[in-house]
Image: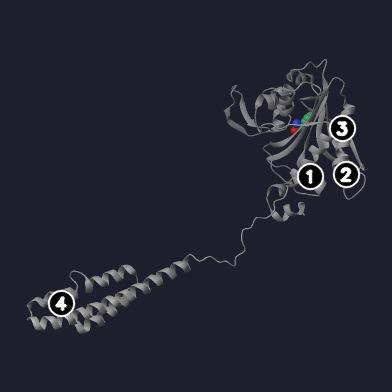
Amino acid sequence: MTNSPDTLVKEAETSFSDANSLSSLEDAKAKFLGKRGSLTSLLKGLGGLDPDERRKRGAQINLVKQEIEALLERRRKELVQQELSNRLAAEAIDVTLPGRGYGVGGIHPVVKAWQRVESIFRSIGFDVADGPEIENDWTNFTALNNPENHPARSMQDTFYIDMKDEKGLPLLLRTHTSPMQVRYARMHKPPIKVIAPGKTYRVDSDATHSPMFHQVEGLWIGTDISFADLKGVYTHFLREFFETSNLVVRFRPSFFPFTEPSAEIDMMFTEGPNKGNWLEISGAGQVHPTVIRNFGLDPELHIGFAFGSGLERLAMLRYGVTDLRTFFEGDLRFLKQFNK
Ligand code: PHE
């Protein structure tokens, strides 16, 4: 770098345009205008000159200084502009992309089935109750005549929770909605007519079983409620649910610890695409005397029936779904079909 005023402007121009960022421009500025910059040392040299020469030279240096400052300012503006457009490019938003939108939600097919079940049972005088999914093992098993270490417990393997409730009872994810029989009956005086739909859990997973699924429990307790009432109520329910009277029901002997006698309810369409196949739809039975006692009632006086049906099974049959897992995959192409 020379110290001649004439070449100084050219040098500054090159140096400024070589600076590609505001911070390197500051470095370049220091070389010319800084305390130890070329221009400053030129000014310092003025002291040794005689007055005439000093004035001439001083004016010349000032001119050079103004030119350099103007160059600096121009480059600074350029760089600010450049940095701004770089940032705009980097943070650009593609306004042509479709928005996320606020689509109208729909009702899940299992919930649709659930709502149908509720409205049918309400129409024949049943209350609808709701209860905890994290249940204690007394209410889920013991109160339902399913004693500790009884092999029938293994029919319903579940997820245990590493915690006890306030009474010190082990907690688990309820394996069925039947504990709601106990909860409801201990809080209400007979006659009791209730359904309790909700989520249930088991260690089970294949095309027809999901670790989380839904059931609806039914309970009718009075002084003279018989198996005939169960048949009447359940057959009425199915005919309403499927909106057809071309449907027959059969009760097959079965076993549940909490009912005696126990039955499996099967149904068959006598018309339509599914006609001619017996389909298992529900467990049911007359409530066991021990369970009536655990309700806090006298089995000599109170009698009734209970049933527990799978909501997925009802939804599959009503909507023609063949794989249970599709209910829980959240695939909109599947789900949208139920909300047209
Ligand atoms: N809780 C039984 C099950 O989940 C079904 C059932 C309910 C059977 C009520 C009888 C009475 O398999």
- Asked if residue 164 lies left or right of residue 31, the reply is right
Q: Which residue is mark 4?
A: 42
* Mark sitting on residue 315: 1
Between disc 3 and disc 1, whose residue precedes?
3
Q: Which residue is mark 3?
A: 233
- How many circles with numbers are drawn on the protein? 4
Inter-mark Cα distance, 3 to 1: 19 Å
User: Helix, strand or loop at disc 2?
Assistant: loop
Name the secondary structure under disc 4. Answer: helix
Location of mark 2 (residue) = 243
- Could you tell which of marks 4 and 2 lies nearer the N-terminus? 4
Image quadrant occupied by the N terminus:
bottom left
Mark 4–mark 3 distance (CA, rounded to whole Å)? 109 Å
Percent across and percent down for residue 147 are 70, 22
Hey, which quadrant is residue 218 in on the image?
top right
The mark closer to the camera, 1 or 2, is 2
